[in-house]
Amino acid sequence: MSRVVTWRVLVAFVALAALPALPGIPTYYLLLAFDALLFGAIAMSLDLLMGYTGLVSFGHAAFYGLGAYATAILLERGVLSLWACLGGALVVVGVYAAIVGYFATARRGIYFALLTLIFAEVVYTFFRYTQTFGGSDGIQGLPDAHLWRGVPIDTPQRKYYLVLVYLAVAYAICRVVVTSHFGRVLVAIRENEDRARFLGYRVQRYKMAACMISALLTGLAGAIYPMRAAFATPDLMLWTESGEFIISVMIGGLGTLVGPILGGAFFTILRDKVSSFVDWYFIVIGVVLVLIVLFMPKGLLGIRRLHGFRQWRQGA
Amino acid sequence: MAAGGVVLEVDGVSKSFGALSALSRVGLAVSEGEVFSIIGPNGAGKSTLFNVIAGLHAPSAGRVVFRGHEITGLPPERINRLGIAKTFQITNVFPEISVGENVRVAAQSRSADSGRVASLWRAADVEVRVTELLESFGLAVKRDELAQHLSHGEQRYLEICLALATEPTLLLLDEPTAGMTPGETRDATALVRKIALQRGLTVLLIEHDMSVVMGISDRIAVLHFGEKIAEGTPEAIRSDARVIEAYLGGADD
């Protein structure tokens, strides 16, 4: 249909938009849908780095958590505007991502992953052990944000639409980016970074820009989260959170954007369902993930695997 | 053949890797529009010289001047944007994207948006150039195949396509016919010569097989153990005593 949106995606969004209109849908499911879409959007943002650029970030939880804290701090001080919260998150996450990106993109492979992880752990430790922002309790009991004066985002429906609009915008941005001149260079970098340099591309700049876009989109998702949960805690920045984003991308399929959205949603719903039955839910999830990796090596929608597994790829 | 002024000047370039001296005080001057070949037995330092010119290695001593700009030690992306493109001895393409996408990403490197913020949303229209390049190398029918599924000979051509797509004025070809059959080698050599003429390119060619370069070179330089031992027309090189000695003496290495 166009570069940005296909009919199938459009239909999916319309169906998602109709979800709250389902007669008698419990609030619980609407909020679960919120979490699923938010997690999906983060996985999609990470896919820009993992699937397209070939960089595995182990520190996306920090972008997410910083976005959440930006909102929490503003809401706590009575700044209720949604736009102020999103703006605040963009600034905070942007500054942090510029620093991390500058150092991490100067290194390749496992060093990139480790640098993003180390920076994220520093941020986590800061929020966990500094009492200014509530320490391990974080910031709790936040008021609802307002779309504009007099329109609070208070009902589950409104919160759901907030995340749906965010997902739509983030998806459109990602689609435009991956189909642009820039997106093609990212893929070239993933495929053969050295050759890309000999074609005249300043590879580090491209990696840096990809990091910034991915981080800012993740930061916005973080900024939205406290508007539904009414809190921000340091656990949002824990490295396991970053690991879950990576797993979601893998489940969904690298380099597909839509795949990671599905992967993130699937992961969120699976975790929610299993954990309502057993405490040791991660063992169950682990088994499911192992099965997916074994029997669907390209993920739900995947077209390719990480580097080093090329032999798995089917014909053209 | 050699018409205009000097395009590339390599002046006293040395390169050592630790105790190993790969190049010692090599000098060359390549003129506008000529096909200049560098030959020598394996290990003579030919690829190292290319890597110094193209920016992969900074030389230990000496300088490289391209069209009046000193390019010694600049990174490969800068050197490419000045108009020098390099192909690789071991095929070095983008394996898991299509042949067409390979050439497209190379071609858009010269579009107006490249390196600018607008490249984040705009897609450069390089269709005409991509099609033209693929056609001239007989790859148009393979356009939608993944690069890794091409035959060896086709990959060698794609390698040259990528370099040409960046619209160089100086093309560095590192053993473009490596691994080809004698028949393919002949065709490839003729094609390279034709394209260089059409595009008014200056070509610097590395070969270890002397017979390939004799037919297409205007001038030839011979490297042996990192030193230039001869330079001249193909006829002069063919009869040069030191060259014959280097090739015969080096036959067992």
Image: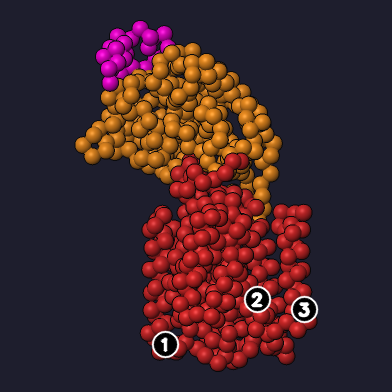
Chain colours: A red, B orange
Three-letter amino acid code of the residue under disc 2: Ala
- In whole angstroms, how far apart are the C-alphas of marks 3 and 2? 13 Å
SS category of the residue bearing label 3: loop
Pointers 1 and 2 in contact (C-beta within 8 Å): no
Name the foreground residue: B199 vs B174.
B174
- Name the residue located 39 percent from the left edge and 35 percent from the top edge: B51
- In whole angstroms, how far apart are the C-alphas of marks 1 and 2? 29 Å
Label 1: which residue?
A: A135
Subunit of label 3: A
Label 2: which residue?
A: A33
Residue segment shown in magenta: B229-253
Name the foreground residue: B25 vs B181.
B181
Relative to B10, say whether A277 is above or below: below
* Left or right: A276 as drawn, with respect to A119: right
Relative to B52, say whether A205 is above or below: below
Where does the image place residue A278, in percent across and percent down from the top left?
50, 80
Callout 3 environment at 10 Å: few (<14), some (14 to 19), or many (20+)?
Answer: few
Residue B231 on the magenta span: yes
- In whole angstroms, how far apart are the C-alphas of marks 3 and 1? 40 Å
Quadrant of the drawing holding the C terminus of chain A: top right
Quadrant of the drawing holding the N terminus of chain A: bottom right
* Left or right: B49 as drawn, with respect to B192: left
- Name the residue located 26 percent from the left edge and 14 percent from the top edge: B249
Q: Nearer the viewer, mark 3 or mark 1?
A: 3
SS category of the residue bearing label 2: helix
Callout 2 environment at 10 Å: few (<14), some (14 to 19), or many (20+)?
Answer: many
